[in-house]
Image: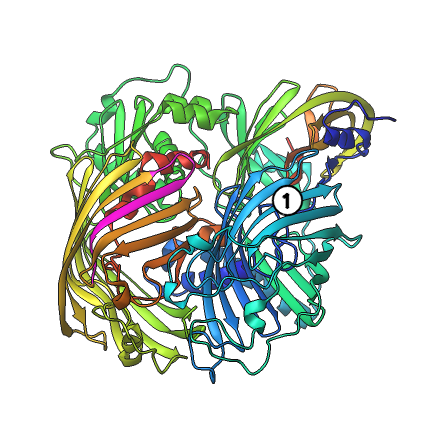
Amino acid sequence: MKTFFCKPALFCCASAIAIGVGPSTVDAQQTTMSPSLGMYGTTGLIDMPSAESQPDAELTTSLSSFSDFTRGTFTFQITPRLSGSFRYAKLGNWAIGGPITSPSYFDRSFDFQYRLVNERDYIPAVAVGLRDFMGTGLYSGQYLVASKNLGSKLKLTAGLGWGRLSDTTNVTAIDTTLGGSPNIGSWFRGPVGGFGGIEWEMPVEGLRLKAEYSSDHYVLENELLTRDGQNRTRPNATFDRKSPINLGLDYRTKRGMQVGVYYLYGSEVGINFSTALNPKRNNRFVDRAPTPIHQRDANYSKSTEWTQIAGIQEKAREQLDAELKKDQIRVESLHFNGVHAEVRITNRKYKAVANAVGRTARAMAKVFPDSVESFTIVPMDNGLAASAITLNRHDLETLKNHVNGASLLAARADISDASALPAGVESVSGLYPKLTWGIAPFVELKVFDSTDPFAVSGGIRANAKYQVSRGFSISGSASKRLLKSDTIPSPSFSGLPHVRTDVGQYNLQTNIGIDKLSADYVFKLAPAVYGRLSAGYLESMFGGVSAEVLWKQADKNWGLGAEVNYVKQREFDRLLGFQNYAIATGHVSAYYETKNGFELQVDVGRYLAGDIGATVSIDRSFDNGWRVGAYATITDADPALFGEGRFDKGVRLEIPIGWALGTPSQSSVKTSLKSLTRDGGQRLSIENRLYGTIRDSHTRKISGAWGRIWQ
Amino acid sequence: MIKQTLIVVSILALTACSSKNNEKAGVGSIITTQLKGVIVARKAAKSGAKPVAPKPLTFADVRKTKADLVRIEIPKYKSATLAQFTNNNDGYKTYVTGASQSFTLKGSELTGTRGLGHDLMARSIGDADRTYKYLDAINHTRRFDVTCSSKSAGMEKVKVLDKTFNLRKIEEVCRNESKAFKNVKWVSASGNTRKATQWVGHEIGFVIIEWLN
């Protein structure tokens, strides 16, 4: 049977294959090769880049090694077209940044790649890239590259390169004085050379043969006279680059794990290993089925006489509490009349507020008599009434099984700022005071240090929170370190007050330490104005007082805030004492959420070392709780006093535990990576800042995960 | 590997001693259940004891319960369980299992599941053009559209519990440009569906439903 006229082609596959006698499925086949990772931990051939992008939001971690070089790279597909990478590399037989007798150099670098053109029938994908675009620029190279799939088994790549990729020995000398600043002047300048290669998907599934022509001459690694501005010499070339041809094999699993072995430059064997995580990957997420929505009869009673029953308030609260307890939702307050009910809830289970709202609405439909026509649900975040979601009961009943029920309900729901409780309405008694505590092991990793690439410490940590009343709490944590691999801390050479670079002294001199011990009061000044007062040992290195105010309307995607602090530096033993250094700091902040899931934050003010400047943060936030972001702080601190790096910058990652385990949880694993720890541009580390506390209960976040209202 | 590490770290964190441990029963029960399963299996293996086969369920047993029951089998999960009617919302009947999973049926059509993971959130009814709705990993609602057509495939003997029925087999083929699947149901002369095999979604695959009343 000819299928020339059958469009699209994939339909032909499904149509042409006979469906079996019993229940059966037929899936269309993949028509292009998936993008793979190269030795730089970015999409590419072996040592050369290619023009494709990883799947949107893919977060890859790779480790590669050949000769005296080891590279660890994190790459995030920031948007479908744009990727960013952070790389930490160890270069042996190297003199820069240290005495020749200690020849290993640890280098940090950042890359960007942007896909300019999507691949189509006769047009290849085209991308432009900046490799190691700031700082010393050891790996600095720029490229324009094109890739084209020829069927599902073969892919060709060709590109033009500048800098290290120029196919010449005329490579820009390293500027060790530049550390931390973009080396814009050298981008796309000087000689240009070509590179290219081929990828062939072999008959064994997941196995791929790669061959490439490399335009990187590895000049800097092989010159006997190093060009680091100090004219030091190395006794031997790092490796013998006999050939520009590299070839090897990759094996890639369906879940994105990749292993590669290559024969490089005619003399070396290289290996590459990478894994991938993607917040969009569909893990199985299991939770107990919700209570079905009670359907009222067609001629249901609209009588409100039931409101006159003695003790009805208490009875309703008890019944609702019993229903919600199964989902770890507690009733904070409840008030109602014959046609409307409002409940304030504390949700301890669901990351998605819509999920908790949906479960609460189901419980209310079960508990309340038929005359109650609408429900308002107020999520309480750390004691703050963060928003008010009002649902019509009839909509719940009629849309629950509708194929477009989620979007129709979203259109009819109202999300607004929560008002104060009406006069005479009391919070549920017996909720406060409340003590919660925990003891857990902890592990801390220190990575990417300029002299020590990896250090680990760990121990046991106890934490407790005494909730005195709604919004007022005393909380703290203490830890005992049982394992320390870096017993000799790196000395601080910072010319600024040592507000962060003495972290090694803290770790060395702390036996049992108080990580934090503070009293906090959060409150509302108006429906959209939130406040926080904190006093005590606010974080591991500073104690004092802190006050914050935030204006953020529930239905708006932006907000404004301000914070002032007066703090003193704590003693290295992390007990009760303080050092002499004290400072007043503070910031004004602006928050903005884009429609496509990016959150921007700008903080302007005075930092812990007394420097004045601004921090710009951008996070890609996913509606399952994943966050991947980066930040940079530029202040008026003298670059000479700041030290290597010029300004503070880093990347951060938050992964919800519920995503990893496939079961509801509000907990997350958070981590951040800084290229260097410096004293300039450092803010006080406060756990419960207001924006992060209430953000998930506002329209943008609730709407993003609205589908979970039916879960 | 990172994900496995995360899981280990997560379990470590969640199983730490805490005043809130009772509030994390979801995680705890999963782990405990898995551990219990392993321990029981090991004990049985050590003792050499043969597993005791449960007595097969019969229609007489079902009648005694006076409950509206369906038997649900999910081949991909290698699970089979009974589910009891709990709620009727405008003709959409919800059945709930002992493991707090629910299945919503409109007539003999499965229109929603909960508690399975990768749940079918909603499904359109009646038209040849059919829409399935799911939540993806980032909690966004995703639709999957197919076009379906049904035909009779003759009579077939079908065993349900302890009885064999002579039923009309109806096959329904649904397809779009990337997928094709076939549902089957077996219907009595009076028009009641006794058994059906229905595609639920990409991850769950098919479920087999038997009506026991």
- Quadrant containing the N terminus of chain A is top right
| Residue A151 percent coordinates (x, y) | 75, 41
Identify the secondary structure beneath mark 1.
strand
From what the image shows, is residue A412 above or below residue A458? Answer: above
* Between B73 and A591, the one nearer to me in the picture: A591
Q: Residue at x 28, y 43 (%)?
A: A694
A397 sits left or right of A145 in the view: left
Query: For mark 1, what is the residue?
Result: A146
From what the image shows, is residue A662 above or below residue A389? Answer: below
* Between A647 and B155, the one nearer to me in the picture: A647
Residue B159 within the magenta-colored segment of the rendering: no
The total of numbered circles placed on residues is 1
Q: Residue at x 23, y 21 (%)?
A: A305
From what the image shows, is residue A190 above or below residue A444? Answer: above
A496 sits left or right of A359 in the view: left
Chain hosting mark 1: A
| Residue A238 percent coordinates (x, y) | 59, 76
| Residue A407 percent coordinates (x, y) | 45, 26
* Between A288 and A272, the one nearer to me in the picture: A272
From what the image shows, is residue A50 above or below residue B48? Answer: above
Give the farthest residue toward the top: A299
The residue segment tinted magenta is: A593-608
